[in-house]
Amino acid sequence: MIFGGLLLRNSFELAFCCAAAASHSRPRFLSMSPSVFRESVPVGGILYLTATVVYTEPAPAGGSRVQIRVDSKVRDVHHSSLRNTGTFTYTFDTEEEFKVLPKTYGEFVSYIDARRKAEAERSWADTSDDVPDTLEASVVE
């Protein structure tokens, strides 16, 4: 089986490239939503990763806050079956401001789900007073 860290790294790199291509600027990583590995990925299986910009909103410091969803699937070469192995959602800030709007029902469902995740992250960030502002403030002697 392929180690989950490799799958996370590959999905992060694809999400980073997707955010950069959509915004025409270098994205800055903010967070990753909780993820679940649904299926294992066997060595020798064909891994398919698909990245989609599912939600954007204005970033507090200017530019855009972008959510990228990466869907991973694996095809078993012996049985030709395609299985969903996981979905990973990454959030980035970009320098350029842009918007995405859903056109199909499936895109709208993904957009609403991503907006809910963004609102949950925002409310968590607003209520967490114990998070230090700088690295120096987090050092305990």
Image (tube, grey):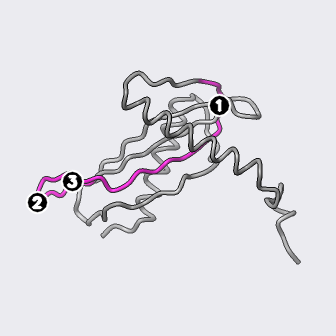
Residue type pointed to by label 2 = His
Residue 58 in the image, given as x and y percentages of width and height: 67, 29
- Given residues 76 and 117, the one toward you in this image is 117
Marks 3 and 1 sit apart, C-alpha to C-alpha, by 35 Å
Picture quadrant of residue 42: bottom left
Residue with the most extreme bottom position: 141
Labelled disc at residue 121: none
Gap between marks 1 and 2, in whole Å?
44 Å
Callout 2 secondary element: loop
**Label 3 sits on residue:** 75
Secondary structure beneath dot 3 equals strand
Q: Position of residue 77 (x, y in %)?
A: 15, 57
- Residue 120, position as x, y percentages in the image: 63, 46
The amino acid on which the numbered mark 1 sits, given as a three-letter code, is: Ser
- The boundaries of the magenta stretch are 74-98
Residue matched to label 2:
78
Q: Residue at x 26, y 54 (%)?
A: 74
User: In terms of depth relative to the viewer, which is nearer, 84 or 47?
Assistant: 84
Residue 25 is left or right of residue 124, and the answer is left
Quadrant containing the N terminus is bottom left
Tell whether label 1 touches label 3 (CB within 8 Å): no
